Image (cartoon, helix red, strand yellow):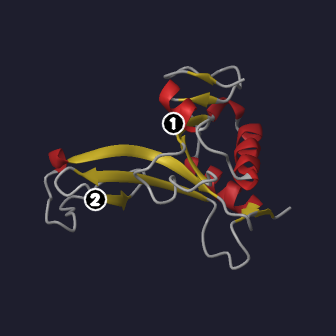
Amino acid sequence: MVSYSKKTIDDGMPRAKSMAVFLEFTLVPMLEELATVLFWVHSKWPNAFVLTSGYRLDSSEHAIIPLSAADLRTWYFEDPRAAAKDVNEHFRYDNEESKAVCLFHRTIKCLECRGKEEVDPVDGMAVGFECVCGNSDPARFKDFGPHFHLRSCRETIVRY
């Protein structure tokens, strides 16, 4: 059973940040490889597992059917960088190892051109940051906060 909650997490149940996010995981089929990654992350950190995004049309990786990407909140991880490293040491994305399975990152969206940029997950936008459209006003960006982006493909395998 999946429950959803805003801030409390103490019973080890998988959670979604909202009912809308919960429903994102029911709209389309999921790759078995992504499910394997999600189950492994939950089993390793049950009290830190909060889904923040699944299937959505405004993203190239989140709009793939079957679902091959998910986002997790990082608030509850003691050391998010170490957790991302642990996931990437346990899973290999594909035979070429061209991508990491788990990215610890922060996404901001420019409210002028609607473009999205990746910034430092801890520090956020650096002073003087400028979007490709020329916008550099911090008030004109939406910050989605630090999070894990988990991705998979049919070639994703467990390393050990």
Kind of residue sitting beneath label 1: Trp
Q: Secondary structure at mark 1?
A: loop
Q: Left or right of 113: which side holds 117?
A: right
Depth check, front residue: 149 or 46 = 149
Marked residue nearer the N-terminal end (1 or 2): 1
Kind of residue sitting beneath label 2: Gly
Image marks 1 and 2: residues in contact by CB distance under 8 Å? no
Which quadrant of the figure contains the N terminus? top right
Q: Which residue is mark 1?
A: 75
Q: Which mark is residue 84?
A: none
Q: Left or right of 62: which side holds 11?
A: right
Residue displayed at 67% across by 25% down: 2
Return the residue found at the far right: 160
Question: x and y percent of residue 126 in the render?
Answer: 26, 59
Question: x and y percent of residue 26 in the render?
Answer: 62, 35
Instruction: Tell me if residue 52 comes above or below residue 64 in the rendering.
Output: above
In the picture, residue 64 is in which quadrant? bottom right
In the picture, residue 133 is in which quadrant? bottom left
Depth check, front residue: 145 or 156 = 156
Residue displayed at 67% across by 63% down: 153
Q: Classify mark 1: residues with Cα within 10 Å, few (<14), some (14-19) or many (20+).
A: some
Return the residue found at the far bottom: 96
The answer to whether any part of residue 31 appears in the image is yes
The answer to whether any part of residue 18 appears in the image is no
Residue displayed at 67% across by 30% down: 14
Question: x and y percent of residue 138 in the render?
Answer: 18, 49
Label 1 – label 2 distance at C-alpha: 25 Å
Q: Which residue is mark 2?
A: 115
Say which of marks 1 and 2 sits in front.
Answer: 2
Question: x and y percent of residue 134 in the render?
Answer: 13, 65
Which quadrant of the figure contains the C terminus? bottom right
